[in-house]
Amino acid sequence: MQYSTRQMHNASFFRLKNINLAYSLPAQLLSKVRLSNARVFFNGTNLLTFSQYKIADPEVNNYGTRGWETPIGKVYTFGLDLNF
């Protein structure tokens, strides 16, 4: 039996897994519309992956067969949080 490195690939990667951005509106603006607090927010999950290994997802265990499975989805959430 001969061993070969033909199927070995560099699977180093950098992933932006989660980001949460929020902005609270100023109190002077909110007092005109009778709100005590208002916040606008964005939450993103699995936004970016940088990898030289393009065949499959690099974040798979030794026995994973990524490519035949459902890919990891990206999630974008926008919202408005109001307090009266």
Image (cartoon, helix red, strand yellow):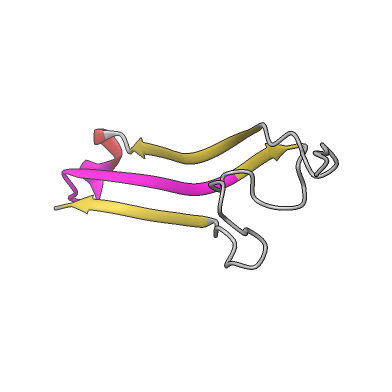
The answer to whether residue 51 is magenta is: no
Most frequent secondary structure within the magenta stretch? strand
Q: Nearer the viewer, residue 80 or 54?
A: 54
Q: How many labels sit on residues? A: 0
Magenta segment includes 34: yes
Q: Is residue 38 left or right of residue 45?
A: left
At 80% from the left and 39% from the top, the residue drawn is 3
Which x, y percent locates residue 30? 25, 43
Q: Where residue 69 sits: x, y (%)? A: 59, 67
Q: Depth check: 1 or 17 in front?
A: 1
Residue 26 at x, y percent in the picture: 30, 34
Q: Residue 68 falls in which quadrant of the image?
A: bottom right
**Which residue range is magenta in the image?**
30-47
Q: Which quadrant would the N terminus be assigned to in this image?
A: top right
23 to the left or right of 65:
left
Q: Which residue is at the front of the view, 35 or 83?
A: 83
Residue 56, given in percent of the width and then of the height, sits at 70, 52
